[in-house]
């Protein structure tokens, strides 16, 4: 069994208040399915008019052009083989097609998990990096893993305190060099402590930065290089946090951060409260970088490991 059984469903049975994925994607589902159902009204096959409309619906729901075209092409092919009788069958076909285009995350398991497993968290300002770190730390800590957080956001004094609050809430340890320190120094010292004191997981927070600010993006690349110099396989996970409600801009962010730091995992936050959850499909498909986590609220348990099938079912209302 995986050490990181956070990724298993069982881990999600947490006490107290937490939002379900179904609730979190309700707005997206209502918007998307409402439009699709209306466009299909009175039809019993996927004619070109409907496919054109579907294309427009998906594109305007932030799924992205390339992903939409891929979905339409696959849907057309499947529908011509199997036929579509009514809106319910259409939903089933759509969810099969969408599932088939989602990359599968490469979760570490068993012997292959490096120790410490190092996660560097990046993204633009206010997307939910620190909150996601707090939620992740809580999940790992609850499994009995020894977790160290690095306060690499030295841009604002309040950032260190915010991370400290999350370390206390989650039970994880934290290393801070104050709010004047060089981010790369914090990264180095956190990693060293993580190695020397045999932590299972090290998670480094970084300051939010605009993806089009070259100097700041270079700083991030430097932080990563410093970690690699200390431990050549670190960081194992460069986790880009994206706010799902930003829609198309999330694509630009994903591109810029991927170029600077070779992002290999994505977290989409704030799915609750947005009708723009379609962005999860496009981002995941277009970048070939798997979505690993979904933020579905502000609480400590409001982070879901991403499961493509579960997500697609929630999006297409299969459980209703
Ligand atoms: N509704 C909702 N709110 C979230 C979620 N994730 C984070 N937030 C909220 O988003 C706000 C910003 O979160 P932070 O974690 O501070 O974001 P950050 O990326 O660390 O911000 P900077 O460090 O300033 O760049 C906070 O009010 C969080 O509670 C989520 O999944 N759902
Ligand atoms: Mg932060």
Image: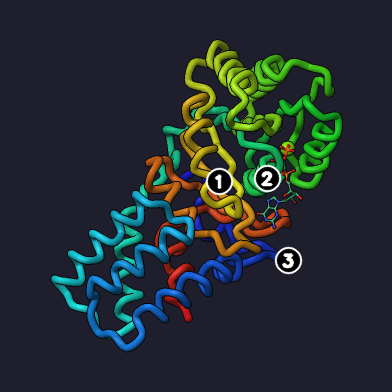
Residue 80 higher or lower than 65, as above or below: below
> Does 181 appear above or below 202?
above
**CB within 8 Å, label 1 to label 2:** yes
First in sequence: mark 3 or mark 2? 3
User: Which mark is nearer the camera, 3 or 2?
Assistant: 2
**Circle on res. 99:** none
Secondary structure beneath label 2: loop
Mark 3 and mark 2: Cα distance apart in space: 21 Å
Mark 1–mark 2 Cα distance, whole angstroms, equals 9 Å
The reply to whether the C-beta atoms of the residues labelled 3 and 2 are less than 8 Å apart is no
Disc marking residue 267: 1
In the image, residue 112 lies at what x, y percent? 42, 32
Q: Are marks 3 and 1 in contact (CB under 8 Å)?
A: no
Element type at mark 3: loop
- x 45%, y 39%: residue: 108
- Point out the frontmost of discs 3 and 1: 1
Relative vertical location of residue 125 with respect to residue 194 in this rendering, above or below? below
Q: Which mark is residue 128?
A: 2
| Residues packed near mark 1 inside 10 Å, few (<14), some (14 to 19) or many (20 plus) | many
Residue beneath the point at 58% across and 45% down = 242
Give the Cα separation between the discs numbered 3 and 1: 23 Å
- Please tell me which residue lies in front, 283 or 305: 283
Q: Quadrant of ligand 2?
A: top right
Q: Is residue 26 left or right of residue 16?
A: left
Tell me if mark 3 has few (under 14), some (14-19) or many (20+) residues whose alpha carbon lies within 10 angstroms of its own.
Answer: few
Q: Residues within 10 Å of mark 2 (few under 14, many from 20)?
A: many
At which x and y percent is residue 91? 35, 75
The residue under label 3 is: 16
């Amino acid at each position: 069994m995986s050490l990181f059984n956070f990724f298993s469903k069982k881990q999600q049975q947490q006490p107290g208040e937490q939002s379900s994925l179904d609730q979190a994607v309700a707005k997206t589902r209502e918007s998307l399915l409402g439009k699709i159902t209306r466009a299909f009204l009175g039809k019993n096959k996927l004619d070109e008019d409907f496919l054109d409309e579907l294309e427009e619906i998906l594109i305007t729901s932030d799924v992205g052009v390339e992903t939409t075209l891929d979905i339409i092409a696959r849907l057309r092919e499947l529908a011509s083989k199997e036929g579509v009788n009514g809106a319910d069958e259409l939903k089933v076909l759509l969810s099969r097609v969408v599932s088939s285009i989602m990359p599968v995350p490469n979760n570490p398991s068993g012997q292959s998990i490096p120790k410490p497993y190092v996660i560097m968290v990046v993204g633009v300002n206010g997307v939910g990096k620190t909150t996601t770190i707090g939620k992740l730390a809580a999940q790992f800590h609850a499994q009995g893993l020894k977790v160290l957080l690095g306060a690499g956001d030295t841009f604002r004094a309040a950032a260190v305190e915010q991370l400290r609050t999350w370390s206390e809430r989650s039970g994880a340890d934290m290393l801070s060099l104050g709010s004047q320190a060089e981010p790369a120094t914090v990264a180095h010292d956190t990693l060293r402590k993580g190695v020397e004191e045999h932590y299972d997981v090290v998670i480094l927070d970084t300051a939010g930065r605009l993806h089009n600010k070259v100097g700041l993006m270079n700083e991030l690349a430097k932080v990563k290089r410093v970690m690699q110099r200390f431990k050549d396989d670190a960081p194992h996970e460069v986790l880009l946090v994206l706010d799902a409600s930003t829609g198309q801009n999330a694509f630009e962010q994903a591109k810029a951060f991927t170029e600077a730091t070779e992002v290999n995992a994505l977290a989409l936050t704030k799915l609750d409260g947005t009708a723009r959850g379609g962005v999860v499909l496009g981002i995941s498909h277009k970048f070939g970088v798997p979505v690993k986590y979904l933020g579905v609220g502000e609480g400590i348990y409001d982070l879901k490991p991403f499961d493509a099938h579960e997500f697609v079912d929630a999006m297409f209302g299969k459980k209703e």
